[in-house]
Every structure is written in structure tokens, then in C-alpha cells.
Image: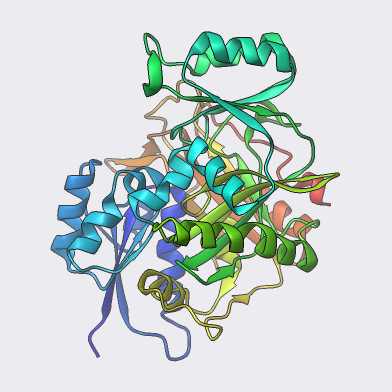
């Protein structure tokens, strides 16, 4: 039988987890033979699959993917999706797990997402959109405590939670690009609500969907949810408040109506639809949608998926998801701890040698590479979030103990990590 070739686009820890899950699935009973190729990948992925270097622009990515003649393309990051990579690949006849540019607007434009939610009656905090900085500052000044969001993509860092009007005005100045004016810039000022956050991701084929195990991200840089927002400093799956009843509610009131509205608009969503939720005293509220798997949530979630994920991704890409496409979830908990570079998130330092990568990995302990590069015989830091150390355990306590034990071994100069990932779940 000819092996099926799957291309994974991206270079982060999420893509490393995707590659490993796809390779692991080949051992499942009746699974198709496969070759997994990463474009561009990273040094960790290169130890497990072939990596093909490529420039980051969409035209270069499309040419490099097409040259591989894959049976399926799995796109990890949001930027190439928003820039139309899936559209280019669809035009060439390829199956793609990842939305078109029009559907990816659900992440690329927060105002678009708000319009979708209003039309679909999805519960979300009230907000106002501004294209003039002074108008935004004046509104925030009257509102007081609020959340200021840059309308476009910002690698998970375009959101500032403000406790006062003065903070909100400073946040608007911080997010507003220097010298920018007019409709090219959009700032969303949103009411501030309270409650724990939850990440619920569904695999979607444009109409039907399959809800993955829930996860909780830890966005702030420092313990106790202090410091600046980051792309994510760690994750746990499952959080204890993610009950089956809650997930059924999210499916009914958030995911299903959103997919119906996207289909009604002529922009059906195929890929991973990520709902960033807040569990308030008044019920579930959607803070944001993302058009891809979360990072670091994906690392924890994919560690818990048993069986073969390839048929699920393939069915979503082709619009053929059925009730037979069920999840096989490991009942154990997963905890992922991110090791970040010195100076992250403002000015991450590169070039620090990483020690301890020879740590033995297993089905219950993984080192996922993100911001790394090879320098001769060494692996060195090359980005903000450098690695995710992810472990499984009988419960959250055991999983986080294993993850933090690994973190004592894998080190580099200036390393930053939070010591309280998943602590509130115990």
C-alpha cells in the first residue's frame, strides 16, 4: 500500500505535537501508512520527521507544499490561514485541515467575530469598535474597567485587561501603531467580566463538529496571573470545572450556532475552531474565537488523544465528518509547562544553549520544540517560547509533578517559567 503523505505547516510546539500525534496514530489498528513532512518544522521535529525549509510568506509556503504532493495538509498557525494559504491549496486540488481566509476572519478580526456572535445569538461581552484613537480613549475613560483589544492578529498579545480608565487609555496608546490613523486601525473596547477562562476546541467539517477535551491556558507571564500577556505559559487538560454538562452547553449555545452562521454567510469553517470562554456567574461568555488549535493547549490535548487523529483531520478537510469519527481520550490528565527565553515577551534573547534535551521521553512525557535552532552540535534558543514540557499523570497533581521534574533537567540561561501552572486545579 502506498503511504499517505501529510504536510504539517508551522514551526512551533503545537506543530511538533501535531507531527507526533500523526506519527503515533500510524500504530493504531488498521491505520494507514504515512509519511509526515513539516514545513518548515524545527530541530525537535527534525528528529522525528522530514523538515523542509521555507520562507514564511504565503506564496512560498504554497509552492513548497505543492511540491510535496501531499494527500492532506494540516496548517498549524493562524497567520498563513488568514493570508489565504488554504485558498491557494484548495485551488490546486489539495485537502486542507484549516479554514479559508474568509473563515479565518473569525480570529483575524475581532469585530468580524463579534458580528458573527451577535447574528448567531452567542453570548459574549458587550463591546464598541473604534477607528479613531481619541474616540476610543474617551469611551474607555467613561467605561472605566474594561478590556482593550487590537482588532487584528497579534500572536496572542493584542489584548490588555484594564482595571481603570487610566489603564485603558494607556492600553489604547500602547496598542495603537505609531503614526497610524483612520480605518486601517481598529480597536475594540469591551466590558470587563469576571470568572475562570476555559479553552474549548472543536474539529469542524463546515457543518458537523467533534469537541476535543477541554483545556485551560495560563496567559500571563508571572505566577498568580500577573505581568504581561503572552502567547501562553502552560496548559492543563482537563480543568476540573469542564464537566460533560458544561461542554454540552458550549456545543449547543456556542459552537453549533457559530458554525451555522458561518455556513449561512458562505464561509463554512473547516479546521479547528477554538472558543476562548469565560465562566461567569451569569453563564458562559465567549471572549474570542481562534481559527486553529491553541498553543500550548494543543500540546496537552493531543497528548491525551489515543488512536489515530489522521481520519479526523482528513474528514474535516473533506467535509465528511460522521458520528463514526469518535474520539478515544486518555482518562489521565495532561499538564504542559512552557520554558520561555530571557526577555520574553517584549524582547526575547536568542542564542542561549539548551541543556537536558537528552531527557528520556515516553508516551507520558514529551519535549515539544518551538523557538529553537541548531547551532553546530548544540540546540539554542531562537524565539520567545522555546519549549513545552508536557506530561501525563493519573491526576493533575501527578501530571504537573512530572512536568516540573522535567523542567528541572531542561535548562538554559535566562530561562523563564511559571511555577503555578495547573496549581488551582488541585
Front-lying residue, 2 or 193: 193
Q: From the viewer's perspective, is residue 415 above or below residue 12?
A: above
Q: Is residue 419 left or right of residue 70?
A: right
Q: From the viewer's perspective, is residue 365 above or below residue 83?
A: below
Q: From the viewer's perspective, is residue 85 above or below residue 325?
A: above
Q: Residue 240: percent from the left, percent from the top?
A: 80, 57
- Point 76% across, 34% down: residue: 193
Front-lying residue, 13 or 294: 294
- Point 58% across, 77% down: residue: 327
Q: From the viewer's perspective, is residue 25 above or below residue 295?
A: below
Q: Residue 389: percent from the left, percent from the top?
A: 57, 50
Front-lying residue, 119 or 354: 119
Q: Residue 154: percent from the left, percent from the top?
A: 46, 32
The number of discs equals 0
Front-lying residue, 362 or 152: 152
Q: Is residue 117 left or right of residue 282?
A: left
Q: Is residue 18 left or right of residue 84?
A: right
- Point 60% across, 60% down: residue: 257
Q: Is residue 32 left or right of residue 132?
A: left
Which quadrant: the N terminus? bottom left
> Would residue 39 be visible to someone looking at this image?
no
- Point 36% across, 49% down: residue: 102
Amino acid at each position: 500500500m502506498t503511504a499517505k503523505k501529510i504536510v504539517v505547516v508551522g514551526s512551533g510546539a503545537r506543530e511538533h505535537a501535531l507531527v507526533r500525534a500523526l506519527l503515533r496514530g500510524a500504530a493504531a489498528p488498521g491505520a494507514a501508512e504515512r509519511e509526515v513532512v513539516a514545513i518548515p518544522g524545527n530541530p525537535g521535529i527534525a528528529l522525528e520527521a522530514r523538515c523542509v525549509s521555507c520562507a514564511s510568506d504565503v506564496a512560498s509556503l504554497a509552492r513548497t507544499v505543492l511540491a510535496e504532493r501531499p494527500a492532506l495538509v494540516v496548517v498549524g498557525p493562524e497567520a498563513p490561514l488568514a493570508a489565504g494559504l488554504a485558498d491557494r491549496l484548495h485551488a490546486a486540488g489539495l485537502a486542507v485541515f484549516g479554514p479559508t481566509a474568509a473563515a479565518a476572519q473569525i480570529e483575524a478580526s475581532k469585530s468580524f467575530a463579534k458580528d458573527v456572535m451577535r447574528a448567531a445569538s452567542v453570548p459574549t461581552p458587550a463591546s464598541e469598535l473604534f477607528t479613531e484613537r481619541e474616540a476610543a480613549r474617551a469611551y474607555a475613560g467613561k467605561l472605566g474597567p474594561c478590556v482593550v483589544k487590537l482588532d487584528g492578529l497579534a500572536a496572542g498579545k493584542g489584548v490588555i485587561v484594564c482595571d481603570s480608565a487610566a489603564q485603558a487609555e494607556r492600553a489604547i496608546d500602547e496598542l495603537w501603531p505609531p503614526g497610524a490613523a483612520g480605518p486601517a486601525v481598529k480597536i475594540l473596547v469591551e466590558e470587563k467580566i469576571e470568572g475562570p477562562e476555559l479553552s474549548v476546541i472543536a474539529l469542524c467539517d463546515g457543518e458537523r463538529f467533534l469537541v476535543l477535551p477541554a483545556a485551560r491556558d495560563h496567559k500571563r507571564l508571572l505566577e498568580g496571573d500577573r505581568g504581561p500577556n503572552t502567547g501562553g505559559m502552560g496548559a492543563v487538560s482537563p480543568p476540573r470545572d469542564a464537566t460533560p454538562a458544561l461542554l454540552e452547553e458550549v456545543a449547543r449555545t456556542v459552537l453549533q450556532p457559530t458554525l451555522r452562521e458561518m455556513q449561512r454567510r458562505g464561509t463554512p469553517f473547516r479546521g479547528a475552531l477554538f472558543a476562548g470562554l469565560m465562566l461567569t456567574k451569569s453563564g458562559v461568555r465567549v471572549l474570542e474565537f481562534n481559527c486553529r488549535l491553541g498553543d500550548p493547549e494543543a500540546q496537552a490535548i493531543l497528548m491525551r488523544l489515543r488512536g489515530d487523529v489522521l481520519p479526523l483531520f482528513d474528514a474535516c478537510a473533506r467535509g465528511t465528518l460522521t458520528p463514526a469519527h469518535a474520539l478515544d481520550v486518555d482518562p489521565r490528565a495532561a499538564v504542559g509547562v512552557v520554558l520561555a527565553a530571557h526577555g520574553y515577551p517584549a524582547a526575547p534573547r536568542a542564542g542561549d544553549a539548551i541543556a537536558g534535551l537528552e531527557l528520556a521521553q515516553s508516551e507520558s512525557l514529551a519535549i515539544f520544540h518551538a523557538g529553537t535552532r541548531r547551532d553546530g552540535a548544540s540546540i539554542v534558543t531562537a524565539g520567545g517560547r522555546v519549549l513545552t514540557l508536557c506530561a501525563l499523570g493519573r491526576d493533575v497533581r501527578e501530571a504537573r509533578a512530572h512536568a516540573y521534574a522535567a523542567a528541572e533537567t531542561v535548562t538554559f540561561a535566562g530561562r523563564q517559567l511559571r511555577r503555578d501552572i495547573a496549581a488551582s486545579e488541585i
